[in-house]
Image (cartoon, rainbow, N blue to C red):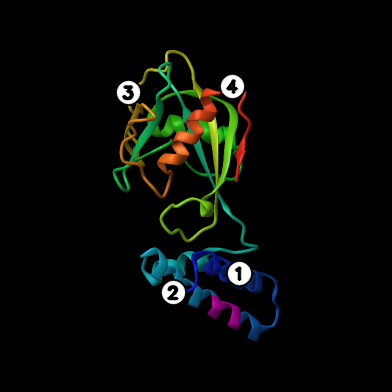
Amino acid sequence: MPTLAQLRELQAIAQEGLTYSRDPFDLTRFARLRDLTAELLAEQTGQSPATVTGLLRAEEGYLTPKVDVRAVVLNAAGEVLLTRERSDGAWSLPGGWADPGESPTQIAVREVFEETGRTVRAVRLLAVMDKAQHPHPPDLWAVYKLFVQCDLTGAGVAAHAENLETLDSAFFPVDALPPLSLPRNLPGQVRRVVALARDPHSTVHCD
């Protein structure tokens, strides 16, 4: 069985071929390679072949990693802000996919407000992590994760804002984290970025 990294490489080759080839026979071959890759990715990730095929067919152009932006917000006690995801009931740093038209810091600030109801200001980039280099559950996509330190503005006290993505939000001691949403963040990642945020002289962690 090919590895997830090998399947992502096959997916990239298929998509590049579909993007740059002009020969109709080659386009047919690359389309078949993409669909075969989707079938193997479905086995690796536990998703249905139809779902994975649909997602891969929707991708166009040169394939690049997706970008996931996460906000690291500490309170005065040094506890970290987490939000509880509707999708799996587990907890994560506020954040999500990067959207065109917004900078990473703008995304971090917006995600904190949308997912927790709290207002923050972005301070600095703490880390850039390659999801493939960490033991997350299998994922279809290659993902770069950006962790942005944000400071609470004002008193920083707010009730959780009801929204479509998250159920609750709260501050937790880093040595007493709740069950985490592992596709989004791992305990070691949270501990690492909290340590970076606590040290004003720390440099950016980059995988």
Q: Residue at label 4?
A: 200
Question: In percent of the image, x 47 and y 40: which residue is there?
Answer: 189
- Compared across the picture, whether 180 is left or right of 62 comes to left
Amino acid type at circle 4 is Pro
Question: In percent of the image, x 45 and y 24: which residue is there?
Answer: 74
Mark 4 against mark 3, which lies toward the viewer? 4
- Compared across the picture, whether 35 is left or right of 80 comes to right
Q: Residue at label 3?
A: 159
- Distance CA(mark 1)–CA(mark 3): 45 Å
Q: Residue at label 1?
A: 15
The kind of secondary structure element at disc 3 is: loop
Disc nearer the start of the sequence (2/4) = 2
Find out whether residue 86 is within the magenta segment: no
Q: Residues within 10 Å of mark 1 (few under 14, many from 20)?
A: many
- Is any atom of residue 39 visible in this view? yes
* Extent of the magenta region: 28-33
- Distance CA(mark 4)–CA(mark 1): 43 Å
Amino acid type at circle 2 is Glu
- Is any atom of residue 164 visible in this view? no
Q: Position of residue 158 (x, y in %)?
A: 36, 20
The kind of secondary structure element at disc 4 is: loop
Disc nearer the start of the sequence (4/3) = 3
Q: Position of residue 172 (x, y in %)?
A: 35, 27
Amino acid type at circle 3 is Ala
